[in-house]
Image (cartoon, rainbow, N blue to C red):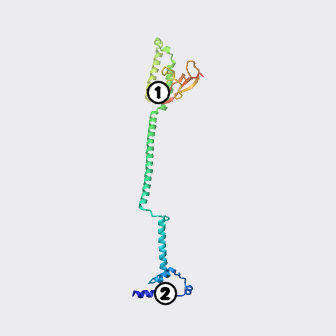
Amino acid sequence: MLQRIILRQRRAVQSAWSISPSTFSSQAPFRQASPLQQLCLKQAPFSVSPLRLYSTQNETANKEEAKKDNGDGNGKEAESPEDAFKKELEAKNKEVVDLKDKYLRSVADFRNLQERTKRDIDSARIFAIQRFAVDLLESIDNFDRALSVVPADKLTAAQAEANKDLQDLHQGLKMTENILMGTLKKHGLERFDPAELVEGKTQKFNPKLHEATFMAKAADKEDGDIMYVQSKGYSLNGRVLRAAKVGVVKND
């Protein structure tokens, strides 16, 4: 039975190929079989469709071309799960480093803000009476001028009976001044007198503490010595509130 079917198919194929070429030229054009297809038809015990053989050759060529692209590296290789995991891990590590850097910077800025705020609060507390103290300096200077007006010879014990009222007034002003300066000292306001001797020597001019109002020659003093005090200086918690006005020696 099988041999009869094969024999019929071979006869049908032979009869199809026995048609003259002119017959094919007058009809719709067919794809001419290649020598390889003719050889296959002669040797095959059954009929083979030329169209099927052509499509099979194309699929085989496409597969070989795809394998060649994947093998020589010209084509894009498929990314493995391990590579994808490594890339994702590197991205996460980079993100962690960036977030840690931002966190440390934020902490440092916050601490700097705390220290700066604390300094501002301390400065405001320490120098809160600065404006009040500046307005009070003129009254303190008036106390000093009133005490310096009284001659020293009228304050001696020999003149106690004759100038008792003057001595009592002078003593009252002196006590009031001492109490006032003691109270101001508790709040950080202190007075410094450039006329006072330091280790038995006249004080030198210091631009941070003194303000030179004039310069003059003095044979018994050196250049830069303070020879006259016009007004005393004041400081508030170490900060110069008002520089002392002085006259400075300049012999050159």
Q: Is residue 170 above or below residue 72?
A: above
Neighbourhood count class around disc 2 (C-alpha, 10 Å): few under 14, some 14–19, many 20 upward: some
**Residue located at (44% from left, 39% from top):** 115
Kind of element beneath mark 2: helix
Residue farthest along the left direction in this orientation = 1
> What residue lies at 51% left-to-right and 80% top-to-bottom?
35
Residue 180, above or below 48? above
Residue at image position (43%, 55%) is 90
Q: Residue furthest top?
A: 158
Report x, y in % for residue 134. 50, 30
For the residue pair 31 and 177, the one nearer the viewer reads as 31
Is label 1 in a helix, a strand or a loop? strand
Asked whether disc 2 touches disc 1, contact meaning CB atoms under 8 Å apart, the reply is: no
Q: Percent x, y for residue 7?
A: 44, 87
For disc 1, the marked residue is: 190
Q: Looking at numbered disc 1 in the image, what kind of residue is underneath it?
A: Glu
Q: Give the side of residue 219 with respect to residue 128, left or right.
A: right
Residue 161, percent across and down? 46, 12
Q: Along the line of sight, which residue is nearer the eye, 124 or 193? A: 193
Circle 1 Cα neighbour tier, 10 Å, few/some/many (<14 / 14–19 / ≥20)? some
Q: Position of residue 33 (x, y in %)?
A: 52, 81
Q: Which is closer to the viewer, label 2 or label 1?
A: 2
Q: Nearer the viewer, residue 138 or 104?
A: 104
Q: Is residue 87 above or below residue 109?
A: below
C-alpha separation, residue under disc 2 versus residue under disc 1: 133 Å
- Quadrant, the C terminus: top right
- Rendered position, 122 above or below 190: below
The label shown at residue 14 is 2
Q: What amino acid type is highlighted by mark number 2?
A: Gln
